[in-house]
Image (cartoon, rainbow, N blue to C red):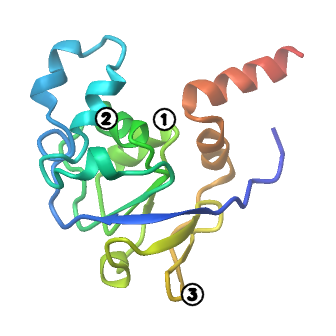
Amino acid sequence: MNEAPSVRTLRGRVWKFGDQVCGDDGIIEFAAVRDGFGKPFDLDALRQMCFRQLRPEFPSQVRPGDIVVGGRNFAHHNHVEVSVAIKASGIAAVLVESCESGFIRRALSQGLPILLVPGITQAVADGDVIGVTPATGAIELADGRVIPSPPFSPQMVRIWESGGLVNALAGEFAAARA
């Protein structure tokens, strides 16, 4: 798989959150889904609870392609259900000041790109329409300015564009058998 990485740009409306947002007890309500741990995800339940403790309007007003912007230590203390809930809500990407590396890995395994973008919370407002290009790390702000973030590696781009790690591996195995 030596194809050139995609330079696809995601464009969406910003949902802005602050610092120290807990994944399991803020983004979702893990206590409500923990009995299903190890079982298939209840996507409807995850969608309905996603961010509702912080922004009660989020589940009913989020649109496919929207972008979450978070502050420092975003989504700390999180299980994979957090990433699944965010992606199932239609969020195209998450831009954060900082977060646990495990959040980045778990989200990418579900096909949800998380980018570290120092200064992003000061550069955007709720409702701004911005562009995100994971392959280059370019973040195009509503006023046209572009700020950098570390780009995705070609392998990360393949996982993201495949819709997650399982799909990416299935594609690689199928190609190897062909």
Q: CA distance from mark 2 to mark 1?
A: 18 Å
Q: CA distance from mark 3 to mark 1?
A: 31 Å
Amino acid type of the residue tagged 1 in the rendering:
Ser
The answer to whether mark 3 and mark 1 are in CB contact below 8 A is no
Amino acid type of the residue tagged 3 in the rendering:
Gly
The answer to whether mark 2 and mark 1 are in CB contact below 8 A is no
Point out residue 138 in the picture as x, y percentages from the top left corner.
58, 73
Horizontal placement of 100 versus 29: left or right?
A: right
- Mark 1 falls on what kind of element? helix
Q: CA distance from mark 3 to mark 2?
A: 32 Å
**Circle 2 sits on which residue?**
47
Where residue 67 sits, quadrant-wise, is: bottom left
- Mark 3 falls on what kind of element? loop
Number of residue marks: 3
Amino acid type of the residue tagged 2 in the rendering:
Arg
**Vertical side of 43 occupied by 14: above or below:** below
Q: Residues within 10 Å of mark 2 (few under 14, many from 20)?
A: many
Pair 2/1: label in front = 2
Q: Residues within 10 Å of mark 3 (few under 14, many from 20)?
A: few
Point out residue 39 in the picture as x, y percentages from the top left corner.
32, 11
The quadrant in which the N terminus is found is top right
- Which residue corresponds to the image point at 35% horizontal and 25% vertical from the top-left? 43
> Which label belongs to residue 144?
3
**Circle 1 sits on which residue?**
109
Q: Earlier in the sequence, mark 3 or mark 2?
A: 2
- Which residue corresponds to the image point at 73% horizontal and 25% vertical from the top-left? 171
Where residue 10 sits, quadrant-wise, is: bottom right
Return the residue found at the far front. Answer: 60
- Mark 2 falls on what kind of element? helix
